[in-house]
Image (tube, helix red, strand yellow):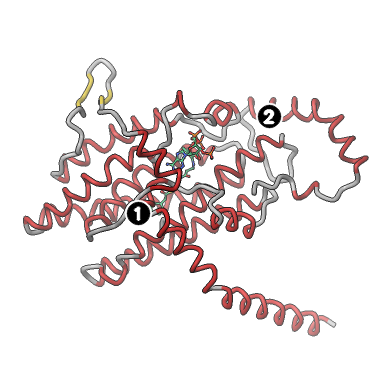
Amino acid sequence: MYTQAMDTMGKEPAEGALRAAEDPRLQQRFDERIDAGEFIEAKDWMPDHYRKTLLRQISQHAHSEIVGMLPEGNWITRAPTLKRKAILLAKVQDEGGHGLYLYAAAETLGTSRDQMIDALHTGKAKYSSIFNYPTLTWADIGTIGWLVDGAAIMNQVPICRCSYAPYARAMIRICREESFHQRQGFDALLTMMTKGTQAQKDMVQDAVNRWWWPSIMMFGPPDDQSPNSAQSMRWGIKRVSNDELRQKFIDATVEQARILGVTLPDPDLRWNEERQAHDFGAIDWNEFWRVIGGDGPCNRERLAARVNAWEEGAWVREAALAHARKQQQRSIKEAA
Ligand code: FAQ
């Protein structure tokens, strides 16, 4: 899937050979620019492995946004008030927009959106583990905003300084919207916890119990089991490690849980004065690898929904293309 450098496809072998001969100098210049903290633009020379790594991460991220619309979309018709329905509708629409910015950023690296979507639909490309869990009650929607968007922001703010400029630019816009998403989730839960019935409070606690561990898995495997981290950090694609981000998220969330009046489902969670951070219990990494391997509670359902939407939406894409062609022909005629 991660077709590299479509811009180099079909060029003469002589030019390819020339580029190969230049590579050590180009590589050196690229390394110097990375070390100096410069941003790399789409037109700049970059090593193939850098391009591939970016495509892997950005496409995974784009797919997460699009698949992430499904668990929340499930509740649009069942939101408890018109206000909450309008907020949820806008949020789900924002996630679709984030996916589009990210597919566009990935396209600058030479892989088409159709290729990326095909990789998703055939199970070759990943999306975030978190979206393979079900949304059973309305409290799940608030909890996704609070914990899932909260974790997403913690992970994504450092990507605003990613060395690849088109990705960094997309992330600046995305992060602004994600912080609203996190707040609306917290607000929905706070309303239930302060004004709700006991049954509603119990529903919030139940949702937090189910989403806590999958949320802290979102940051990826521990640093010593993360095959991509070292190189991605060296290239400034990732700025902060998986474990550091997870720790920062846990430290920030404990206080928010206290304000909400919910208990985080980890008996080992406690402040460590020496580390000036919270200790926490063992994460079930078997569950994480099982879910990203395709065997989570909703993997099959999510993929089937995406494939179905693609197939059922074929006529919309065809109509849009036909309209664009007509518009183009009209403007050519008018210009003639
Ligand atoms: N789920 O070597 P590492 C959101 C894979 S957006 C699935 O540590 P890396 C907004 C990883 O791809 C959420 N797979 O990998 C929203 C790699 O496999 P590969 C998405 C995971 O790339 C909210 C393998 O494990 N955010 O939530 C996961 O250095 C609400 C080894 O891992 C992003 O994508 C996972 N959780 O670090 C939308 C942010 N973790 O590719 C709707 C950008 C790891 O070699 C509603 N991405 N893997 O086959 C990143 O920062 C990084 O890609 C990490 C993983 C940190 C996710």
Mark 1: give few (<14), some (14-19) or many (20+) Cα within 10 Å.
Answer: many
Residue in the picture at 67% in, 79% down: 322
Q: Position of residue 147 (x, y in %)?
A: 30, 46
**Left or right of 297 in this view: 314:** right
First-in-chain label (1 vs 2): 2
Closer to us: 87 or 250:
250
- Report if the beta carbon of the residue with label 1 is closer than 8 angstroms to ligand 1: yes
Q: Which residue occupies the extreme left position in the image? A: 198
Mark 2: give few (<14), some (14-19) or many (20+) Cα within 10 Å.
Answer: some
Q: Which residue occupies the extreme top position in the image? A: 274
**Amino acid carrying mark 1 in the image:** His
> Which image quarter: residue 157?
top left
Q: Which residue is mark 1?
A: 181
Q: Secondary structure at mark 1?
A: helix
Q: Which residue is mark 2?
A: 33
Q: Position of residue 79 (x, y in %)?
A: 25, 68
**Left or right of 66 in this view: 270:** left
Closer to us: 261 or 111:
111
Q: Secondary structure at mark 2?
A: helix
**Left or right of 179 in this view: 81:** left
Q: Is residue 46 above or below residue 32?
A: below
Quadrant placement of the C terminus: bottom right
Closer to us: 58 or 222:
222
Q: Position of residue 60 (x, y in %)?
A: 52, 47
**Left or right of 141 in this view: 160:** right
Residue in the picture at 45% in, 43% down: 293
> Which image quarter: residue 138?
bottom left
Q: Position of residue 244 (x, y in %)?
A: 39, 28
Closer to us: 145 or 220:
220
**Amino acid carrying mark 2 in the image:** Arg
Find residue 40 and name its label: none
